[in-house]
Amino acid sequence: MGKGERGGHKASYLRHRGRLTKGQRRALENAGPQWLVGQGAGVVDWSAEFSRQAPLGVEIGFGMGHALLAWAQAAPAWNLLGIEVYQPGIGALLLRAKLAELSNLRLLDDDAGHALQNTCSPGSLQEVRIFFPDPWPKNRHHKRRLIQPGFVKLLASRLAPGGTLLLATDWQPYARWMLQCLEAESSLANLSTDGFASHRATRPVTRFEARGQRLGHEVWDLAYRKRDSRAPG
C-alpha cells in the first residue's frame, strides 16, 4: 500500500499525532472505548450505535473539539459524529465529553474520505460541518487540500435530500477554491445568493477564529443544501 493510501483510497490528510498530555492519554485509554468508533467494521448502523433513531450530523476535522462539543450540548436530539486524526484533539474532546456525560457523540480517528466512504451509507447524513480546514496555501501543496471535486462529490452522496453542508475558512484563496468546487457539484444548492454566506448562529466562534479576528482576519462561510432529486422541476 502506497504512502498516504488506505485500501485503495487516497488519504486526504497527513497524519499528525502531536504530543499528548497525560490527561489526553488517559482519556484515550479510559474514555476511548465509550466514544471512539472502531475502524474496519464497514458501514456503521448509526441508529444501533447510538441506540436511537435521530438525525445524524458530522464535523470533519474538529481540531480540539470546541465547536463539536458546543453542537452536541446544544442539539441533544441529534446523533453527532466527529472525524479527526489529531490525537491531542481527540483526547481533549474525550475529556470534555466524559465530564459532560454526552451520550449523543461519537468520534472516529480516521481520514475524512475513508471514513465517509466506508462507515456512512449514501443519504445518511443530515448535516456536515467543516470549519477551518488546512488551506495548504503553497501552490505545490494544493493537492493536499481536503476540499477537492472528488471529495465534494463524496460528501454530496452521503447527504440526505435537504441535508446541509456548512464550511468556513479564513484564507480567501481557499474560500474561492471551495466555492468553485461546490458550485461545480450539481446536487448541491448554494443557500446564499451572494456566493458566500453570512456567519451562521449555529457556528460558535472558536478560539482559532477569535485569535484571527483580533489579527484582523476575515472569515468566509459557505452553506449548501442537498437537492432532492425526487422534487419536481
Image (spheres, rainbow, N blue to C red):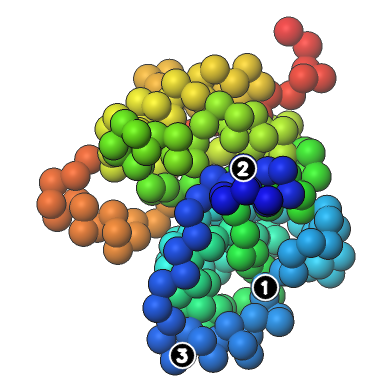
| Farthest top residue in view | 233
* Cα–Cα span, label 2 and label 3: 33 Å
Q: Which numbered tag is attached to residue 10? A: 2
- Where 91 falls versus 162 (above or below)? below
Q: 53 and 1: which one is in front?
A: 1
* Cα–Cα span, label 2 and label 1: 23 Å
How crowded is the residue under tag 3: few (<14 C-alpha within 10 Å), some, or many (20+)?
Answer: some
Residue 100, by quadrant, is bottom right
Which residue sits at x=39%, y=57%? 204
- Where 63 falls versus 113 (above or below)? below
- The answer to the question of whether label 2 and label 3 lie on touching residues, with beta carbons closer than 8 A, is no
The C terminus, quarter of image: top right
Q: 143 and 80: which one is in front?
A: 143
What residue would you read off at disc 3? Answer: 23
Give, as a three-letter code, the residue at label 2: Lys
Q: Earlier in the sequence, mark 2 or mark 3?
A: 2
Mark 2 or 3, which is nearer the eye?
A: 2
**Tally of marks:** 3
Which residue sits at x=66%, y=68%? 106
Residue 128, by quadrant, is top right
Q: 106 and 174: which one is in front?
A: 174
- Label 2's element? strand
Q: Earlier in the sequence, mark 2 or mark 1?
A: 2
Give, as a three-letter code, the residue at label 3: Gly
What residue would you read off at disc 1? Answer: 36
The answer to whether residue 47 of the structure is visible from this angle is: no
Which residue sits at x=27%, y=32%? 172
- Label 1's element? loop
Q: Earlier in the sequence, mark 1 or mark 3?
A: 3
Give, as a three-letter code, the residue at label 1: Leu
